[in-house]
Amino acid sequence: MSARTVQLGARLESRPSSGRLARKPKGPLKSAAGGLNGRSLRRGRTTRVVITNSATTNIESQKVALYEELEKVAPNGLIATPDDKSRIAEIVSAIEQSNPTEAPAQSPLMPGFWRMLYTDMEPAPSSGKLGPFVGDVFQDLRPENSLILNLLKVGFPPIRGGLSAALDIISDDTWRITFADINQYLGPFKVQTKLFDQEKPEVRLWRITYLDDDLRIMRAKKEDDPDEGAFIFVLRRSEAERFALGQL
């Protein structure tokens, strides 16, 4: 049975359930002026009773802890030490155990614009590293069109890049991503386009391990790699930044 939190003004008391049936009170609870369960309260003081779900409270505190750790290794986890990665992986694993979304790969929460906060993969455009430059990484997910865009923005020089890929939902928690092309821009000018060989496609598997309204965690790997080789990706919904890169 979940814990109940009783808030009296600014005072909090947390009492786990004893497992016994509660006795029915003989009379109604008294008002704040007359006291509550035999304890007097100051006249005019507001009394509120708040029942919280301990599981929800726990996951929110874990998310706060995760965001604090990711802030230390920003941008994108590129400066994370082995100890940082180990600590973050531990928090991520705990959060994954509380995934609130059944069949996340098919959830209506998946579509949208997401900013990548962290990955433990090696430096690459997918992790925000383009040569000597570091930028912000976004994902624009459009499952209704079987399309994703992986976007990179470098502030200076003003480089933008976009990887487009086809997606297939292959299970309740996994997307299969097939790379299509990459476009790179310098300012407003397109400077490079790369097409992937569809005879020998570049394929990734995204296993969605946690999904709620604003946080998505996934484990990504090449299709033929073992599951242990999957990299962690942590992303936060960021619809306000949808037009940060302009039209690609």
Image (cartoon, rainbow, N blue to C red):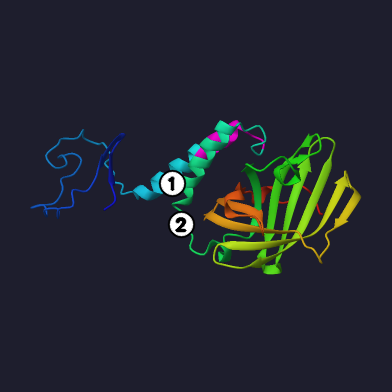
Q: Which residue is tagged 1?
A: 59
Residue 100 badge: 2
Asked if residue 167 is positioned above or below residue 158 in the image, the reply reads below
Residue closest to the eye, 201 or 165: 201
Residue 121 is a magenta residue:
no
For this view, does 240 lie left or right of residue 49?
Answer: right
**Residue 238 placement (x, y as % from top left):** 64, 49
Point out the residue furthest to the left here: 26
In the rendered image, which quarter is residue 196 located in?
Answer: bottom right
Figure quadrant of residue 130: top right
Tell me which corner region of the image, top left, top right, bottom left or bottom right, holds residue 6.
top left
Total number of numbered discs in the rendering: 2
Q: Quadrant of the C terminus?
A: bottom right
Q: Secondary structure at mark 2?
A: loop
Most common SS among magenta residues: helix
Q: Give x and y (percent) for residue 243.
A: 74, 50
> Looking at the image, which residue is at 59% across and 62% down?
174
The residue carrying pointer 1 sits among few (fewer than 14), some (14 to 19) or many (20 or more) residues within 10 Å by Cα, namely some
Q: Nearer the viewer, residue 100 or 92?
A: 92
* x 66%, y 39%: residue: 76
Magenta segment: 66-75
**Could you tell me the amino acid type at mark 2?**
Pro
Answer left or right for 7 relative to 113. left
**Residue visible at 53% across and 37% down in the picture:** 86
Marks 2/1 in contact by CB < 8 Å: the verdict is yes
Residue 102's label in the rendered image is none
State the image coordinates of residue 67 (x, y, percent, origin top left): 54, 38
Taking 124 as reference, is 86 left or right?
A: left
Q: Is residue 70 magenta?
A: yes
| Percent position of residue 215, x then y | 55, 50
